[in-house]
Image: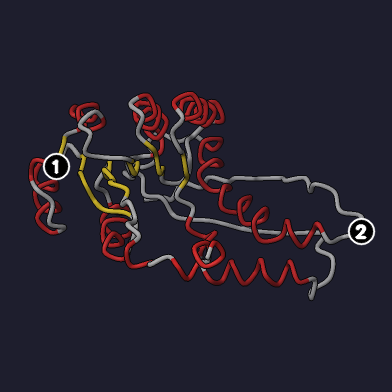
């Protein structure tokens, strides 16, 4: 009888209630509108609960599109009010990079979990501030780096782990993008700050896709990482 009660088959999965995480989306720019907001319809454990932006027209239009009540929209000045409302469990920070630290720390201090868009921040000091704030508050902090879950990268990890391509010794990765001068996501960036914004993808890919494979090498040692960023201004 005891064995029968402890059997997984004795649990009716249909009766198990999954708590849905209530998200406030902070910043309603391109990435929030194109990538995040439409994805809530496919999420089994997450639900859109609030929108935060200083663009009143955008808030109203998106609230209507995603069937959210007008009372669940806030301006940036009302951010702390949203955090303390009791209506959200986590925030998605989709703001320009230089604001990631501030809005993450404020959420942590309010006891709200954070999913922050990449890159984490623009300086190492800001990253440490974000991590420390969440650790002290006991809140979770995750960076929205989707490549860990994409099929092509999972297959790369599988191949590296299998050893079928031998001992991995060198990994080379290149990333580039065009940035308009009026791109508010990267205001007044110098080359050092731009390096933070572009090289994270290369470094994260190296660590994720090859680390297990490199561990199989007889002479494996933690590989050194060298990053270089070049900034070229387009002529108009």
Spot occupied by residue 67 in the image (x, y as percentages of width and height): 12, 56
Spot occupied by residue 91 in the image (x, y as percentages of width and height): 32, 41
Q: Callout 1: helix, strand or loop?
A: helix
Label 2 environment density (alpha carbons within 10 Å; few <14, some 14–19, many ≥20): few
Dot placed on the residue nearer the N-terminal end, 1 or 2: 1
Give the Cα distance between marks 1 and 2. Answer: 57 Å
Residue that numbered label 1 is attached to: 72
Q: Residue drawn at (49%, 63%), measured in percent from left and top?
A: 5
Q: 196 or 112, which lies in front?
A: 112
**Picture mark count:** 2
Residue 24 found in image quarter = top left
Q: 160 or 124, which lies in front?
A: 160
Q: Residue drawn at (26%, 31%), measured in percent from left and top?
A: 83
**In the image, which is nearer the foreground, mark 1 or mark 2?**
1
Q: Residue drawn at (65%, 69%), measured in percent from left and top?
A: 156
**Residue extending furthest right?**
218
Q: 198 or 189, which lies in front?
A: 198
Tag of residue 143: none
Residue 224 located left or right of residue 220: left
Q: How is the image coloured?
A: secondary structure
The answer to whether residue 99 is above or below residue 171 is above
Tag of residue 218: 2
Spot occupied by residue 227 in the image (x, y as percentages of width and height): 66, 45
Label 1 environment density (alpha carbons within 10 Å; few <14, some 14–19, many ≥20): some
Q: 39 or 15, which lies in front?
A: 15
Q: Residue drawn at (73%, 56%), measured in percent from left and top?
A: 211
Residue 172 located left or right of residue 114: right
Spot occupied by residue 77 in the image (x, y as percentages of width and height): 19, 27
Residue 157 located left or right of residue 25: right
Q: Callout 2: helix, strand or loop?
A: loop
**Residue extending furthest front?**
1
């Amino acid at each position: 009888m005891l064995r029968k009660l402890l059997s997984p088959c004795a649990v009716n999965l249909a009766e198990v209630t999954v708590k849905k995480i209530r998200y406030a989306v902070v910043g309603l720019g391109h990435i929030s509108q194109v990538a995040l907001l439409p994805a809530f319809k496919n999420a089994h454990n997450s639900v859109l609960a609030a929108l935060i932006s200083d663009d009143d027209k955008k808030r109203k239009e998106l609230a209507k599109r995603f069937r959210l009540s007008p009372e669940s929209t806030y301006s940036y000045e009302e951010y702390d009010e949203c955090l303390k409302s009791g209506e959200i469990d986590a925030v998605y920070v989709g703001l320009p990079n230089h604001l990631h630290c501030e809005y993450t720390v404020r959420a942590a201090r309010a006891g709200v979990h954070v999913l922050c868009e990449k890159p984490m921040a623009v300086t190492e000091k800001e990253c440490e501030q974000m991590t420390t704030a969440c650790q002290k508050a006991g809140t979770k902090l995750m960076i929205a780096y989707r490549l860990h879950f994409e099929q092509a990268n999972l297959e790369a990890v599988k191949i590296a782990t299998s050893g079928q391509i031998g001992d991995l010794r060198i990994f080379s990765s290149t990333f580039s993008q065009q940035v308009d001068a009026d791109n508010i996501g990267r205001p007044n960036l110098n080359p050092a700050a731009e390096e933070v914004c572009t090289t994270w993808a290369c470094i994260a890919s190296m660590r994720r896709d090859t680390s297990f494979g490199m561990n199989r090498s007889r002479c494996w040692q933690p590989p050194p990482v060298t990053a270089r960023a070049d900034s070229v201004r387009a002529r108009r």
